[in-house]
């Protein structure tokens, strides 16, 4: 119960921040949508980083490392440090410049002008919404998965149908999702992009500090760094997978098992030297058969899991982080920048911030393999470790608030962005700029945000058991497939309207094809390990190049507008 | 020259990311950090240094001037 009170106090703090930012609100739509281009370097870094790091970063990375091992870091985090920073530099600053000069608030406004096409906006709008929705879902699903284990036992008579038997009485995911949605909705509703920037800054600081505090306590619970390194599951000389340790809750201590506990067996591995090795610490693919308990019958059911990654998967994952170039919510954050100089801190510090958050999460996920049952749902690994190793309820509440902070700092930007593009690119664009007053425009955006929040909540309840990491990867894959559109728009004079349409269609058709083959959100590879994003990106690029070359180039007026002789990089 | 250096380092970083030479290794650095993770944490630090170099030697000053100039004749 104490844990729950701490979490509720944090949510109240966020609501008060929404009221505060509402007092600073200038009442104009420009202030609501892009904070009147007034955001400086630190706020920009915090809001961009907070937006890109979501349940995916904390809950997802820990769960993926629990499933696959430490290769998870190189797969997503270190390559994102390189690719994201390059995109901020090459795409973000340039879009900010065009946005500031020509008054764009949304991506679609830029694309309509650059490709001389109204229809392009109507084509792109539903696709952007379709791709942002899975991103929203992982936030709400992730929040639900985190709160239930840490509040287990709080209301045993009220919540009698837990997701797993040990979590009886914990706050159910449907209630957590509802509360989180309402809190985010409230401060976005009141403060707009300025409110989101302030809330993101607070939340990013909270989740980074709390993440490090959690890491320290988990290390302490495992008996120190060196001992923690020995905790993950090990392969013995017979090819059996064993846990050498267990955590004794009563003694609050990690104890060595008298005889190693067998939890699985190696079925197949490309690694020639398995004995006494910890498979979570290498990256060579290794198939292991584990057993998990059926919660209803108590019967042990075998299941297979592949640890490590195929090298081809690792290489082709570099296409996934390209998605930040097309995130509509990130575009909106870029436009809030006071000047191009605001980007400098983000370019340097973003890879460091990723490292500070991801390295502890990935380590905790690998260590968890040695003390948690292998069948535990991956999104619940982080909170299960907190629950097991950090006994103090106040601290557990603060650490859980940190996880919620990471989740909500993305949800707010995404909700706001969908309201912004619907209002500006559909309603105002169709009716004409002078049809609505500023107040009416803000009202329309707010109403649409309410509708999207309700819709997302309903979908999250339907997809409540989805894997947070895999669903996020599908969302990123869709946006990375659209990356050739923005890159060509900025750097290739010959890119045409027809080329952009063909590129978008190629991206969507290939993405939907693979998404269908994945069973709508599961892990899926093409051939011997190629991520679908690589193929979607390739199809989109080819369509852009071929169709642009066989159609008429853009007008000289448009080329003069977007390719003025402003620097030597164009 | 500065821009060429930055872009060359950027391409080099892509190759350095594919550390197949330690793919099967699981030894620990500092007694707790698996080599596959330690290497990529170092890679993140290198990305930050590359970002600093890009700002020093390839910063698009002209874009800022362009954005702040008064000429909005082609406003959408």
Image: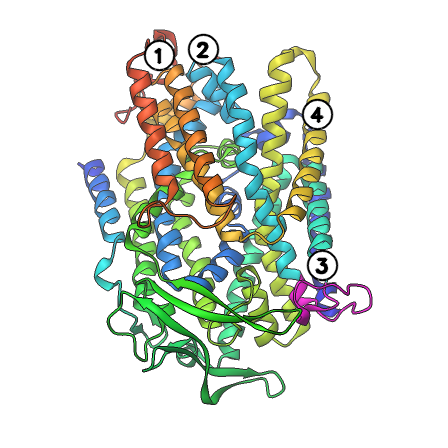
The percent position of residue A299, horizontal first and vertical second, equals: 59, 73
**Magenta segment includes A155:** yes
Q: Nearest to the eye among marks 4 and 1: give it.
A: 4
Foreground label between 3 and 1: 3
Neighbor class of circle 3 (other Cα within 10 Å; few <14, some 14-19, many 20+) is: many
Instruction: Determine the chain carrying the residue at label 3.
Output: A
Q: Position of residue A477 (x, y in %)?
A: 43, 40
Circle 3 residue: A172
Chain for disc number 4: A
Crowding at dot 2, Cα within 10 Å, few <14 / some 14-19 / many 20+, comes out as few
Discs 4, 3 touching: Cβ within 8 Å? no
Residue drawn at 44 percent across, 64 percent down: A304
On what subunit does the disc labeled 2 rest? B
Are the residues at dot 2 and dot 1 in contact (C-beta closer than 8 Å)? yes
Q: Secondary structure at mark 4?
A: helix
- Please name the residue that numbered disc 2 is placed on: B74
Q: Which residue is mark 4?
A: A444
Residue under label 1, please give it.
A560
Foreground mark, 4 or 2? 4
């Amino acid at each position: 119960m104490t844990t729950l009170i701490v979490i509720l106090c944090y949510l109240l703090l966020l609501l008060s921040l929404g009221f505060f930012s509402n007092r600073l609100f200038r009442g104009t739509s420009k202030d609501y949508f892009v904070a009147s281009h007034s955001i400086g370097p630190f706020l920009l870094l915090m809001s961009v980083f907070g937006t890109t790091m979501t349940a995916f970063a904390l809950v997802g990375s820990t769960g993926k490392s629990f499933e696959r091992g430490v290769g998870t870091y190189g797969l997503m985090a270190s390559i994102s440090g390189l690719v994201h920073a390059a995109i901020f530099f090459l795409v973000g600053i340039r879009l900010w410049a065009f946005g500031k000069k020509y008054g764009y608030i949304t991506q679609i406004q830029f694309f309509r002008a650059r490709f001389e096409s109204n229809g392009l906006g109507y084509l792109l709008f539903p696709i952007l919404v379709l791709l942002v929705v899975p991103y929203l879902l992982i936030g709400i699903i992730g929040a639900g998965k985190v709160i239930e284990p840490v509040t287990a036992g709080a209301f045993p008579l009220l919540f009698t149908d837990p997701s797993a038997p040990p979590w009886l009485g914990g706050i159910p995911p449907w209630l957590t999702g509802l509360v989180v949605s309402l809190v985010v909705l409230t401060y976005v509703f009141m403060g707009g992009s300025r409110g989101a920037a302030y809330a993101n800054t607070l939340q990013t600081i909270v989740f980074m500090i709390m993440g490090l505090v959690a890491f320290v306590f988990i290390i302490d619970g495992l008996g120190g760094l060196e001992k923690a390194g020995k905790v993950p599951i090990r392969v013995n000389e017979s090819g059996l997978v064993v846990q050498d340790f267990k955590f004794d809750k009563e003694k609050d201590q990690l104890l060595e098992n008298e005889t190693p506990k067998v939890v699985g067996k190696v079925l197949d591995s490309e690694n020639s030297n398995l004995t006494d090795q910890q498979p979570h610490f290498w990256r060579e693919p290794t198939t292991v058969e584990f057993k998990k308990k059926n919660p209803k019958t108590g019967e042990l059911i075998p299941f297979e899991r592949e640890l490590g990654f195929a090298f081809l998967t690792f290489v082709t994952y570099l296409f996934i982080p390209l998605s930040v170039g097309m995130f509509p919510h990130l575009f909106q954050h870029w436009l809030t920048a006071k000047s191009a100089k605001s980007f400098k801190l983000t370019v340097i510090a973003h890879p460091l911030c990723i490292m500070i958050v991801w390295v502890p999460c990935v380590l905790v996920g690998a260590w968890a393999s040695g003390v948690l049952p292998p069948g535990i749902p991956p999104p619940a690994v982080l909170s299960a470790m907190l629950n097991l190793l950090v006994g103090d309820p106040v601290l557990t509440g603060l650490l859980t608030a940190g996880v919620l902070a990471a989740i909500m700092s993305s949800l707010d930007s995404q909700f706001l962005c969908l309201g912004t593009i619907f209002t500006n690119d559909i309603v105002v664009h169709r009716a004409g700029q002078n049809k609505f007053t500023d107040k009416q425009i803000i009202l329309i955006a707010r109403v649409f945000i309410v509708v999207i929040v309700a819709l997302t909540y309903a979908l999250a309840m339907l997809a409540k058991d989805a894997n947070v990491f895999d669903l996020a990867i599908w969302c990123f894959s869709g946006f990375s497939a659209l990356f050739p559109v923005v890159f060509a728009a900025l750097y290739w004079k010959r890119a045409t309207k027809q080329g952009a349409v063909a590129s978008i269609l190629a991206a969507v058709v290939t993405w939907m094809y693979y998404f269908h083959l994945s069973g709508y959100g599961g892990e899926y590879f093409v051939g011997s390990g190629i991520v679908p994003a690589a193929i979607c990106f390739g199809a989109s690029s080819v369509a852009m190049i071929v169709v642009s070359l066989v159609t008429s180039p853009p007008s000289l007026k448009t080329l003069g507008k977007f390719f003025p002789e402003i620097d030597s990089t164009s | 020259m500065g821009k060429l250096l930055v872009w060359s380092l950027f391409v080099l970083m892509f190759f350095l990311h594919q550390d197949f030479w330690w793919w099967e290794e699981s030894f620990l650095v500092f007694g707790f950090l698996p080599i596959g993770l330690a290497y990529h944490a170092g890679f993140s630090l290198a990305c930050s240094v590359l970002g600093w170099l890009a700002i020093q030697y390839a910063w698009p000053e002209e874009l800022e001037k362009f954005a702040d100039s008064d000429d909005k004749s082609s406003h959408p």
